[in-house]
Image: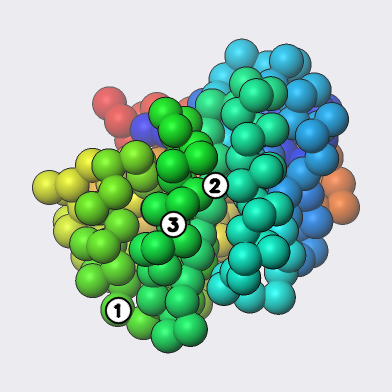
Amino acid sequence: MMLEIIATSLEDAIAAERAGADRLELCAALTEGGLTPSLGLVEAVVQGVDIPVHVIVRPHSRTFQYDEKDLAVMLSDIRYIKQAGAAGIVIGVLDEENKVNTEVLSRLLLEAGEMNITFHRAFDEIEDQLKALEVIATFPQIQRILTSGGQAPAPEAAEQLKKLVDKSKNTSVRILAGNGMSPETLVPLVTATGLEEVHFGSAVRVNRSFMHPVDEAVIADVKSNLQRLGE
């Protein structure tokens, strides 16, 4: 069972690793859903922890549709993130019909090269997620999709998440459940869906707020529950 924790600072990253996180998603501006962090922060976190660091590449929060100017920024960010030694990036691009924009995605993946790739929660804007999973799975560079199974929080979408997990079994893509995850709902959700990767944000922070640091005791408890589930 893989536990991914959102980090917004070096302190977050070190604490999350110490508490048992397997991987980090590094973001800025979480009140806007997560934007690309500064290069200085990327370098500090990559150098400061031993677990994989995946960096979100999202230049603004207005939409998941990007024009050529946005794309130029994203390509440059990917280049610098790769040079900084990050293990992966977290991206998501849609077209005007809220379907996977395969042309733009291909360009981003070409720049990413051999980096680990997560398609982020832009996926939850897509109406036919099972079809979208098929499209994403045609890109062998993409290892996982971060999703709550739609617009509702993940614990409320167990049926859809199970469909996605089942659909993904014959592909190279894993389903990473995020949004609304909590220690209380973790075990029943994983049991009902067969999830093998989970993504935690505010629920593993002091006061369950992104305004506060990560809570190592909560992360350790989540990790312990995942280990029991994996036995």
Say which label, 2 or 3, has the lower sequence index.
2
Q: Amino acid at mark 3?
A: Leu
Tell me the distance, in whole angstroms, between the alpha carbons under discs 2 and 3: 12 Å
Residue named by callout 1: 128
Earlier in the chain: of badge 1 and badge 2, it is 2
Q: Which mark is residue 90?
A: 2
Element under disc 3: helix
Q: Which residue carries the number 3 mark?
A: 105
Query: Is residue 143 placed above or below 65 in the rendered structure?
Result: above
The amino acid sitting under disc 1 is: Asp
Which of the image's four quarters has the N terminus?
top left
Q: CA distance from mark 1 to mark 2?
A: 21 Å
Question: Is residue 160 left or right of 99 when viewed as pictured?
Answer: left
| Whole-percent x, y for residue 110 in the image | 44, 42
Q: Which mark is residue 210?
A: none
- Which residue is found at the position 23% from the left and 71% from the top? 131
Colouring method of the image: rainbow
Tag nearer the camera, 2 or 3: 3
Q: Is residue 61 visible?
A: yes
Residue at left 47%, top 61%?
104
Q: Answer above or below: position of 197 versus 123.
A: above
Q: Which sits in the foreground, 220 or 113?
A: 113
Asked whether disc 1 touches disc 2, contact meaning CB atoms under 8 Å apart, the reply is no
Q: Residues within 10 Å of mark 3 (few under 14, many from 20)?
A: some
Q: Secondary structure at mark 1?
A: loop
**Residue 98 rendering spot, x and y as whole percentages:** 44, 80
Left or right? Give the position of 13 relative to 116.
right
Furthest residue to the left?
170
Number of numbered labels in the structure image: 3
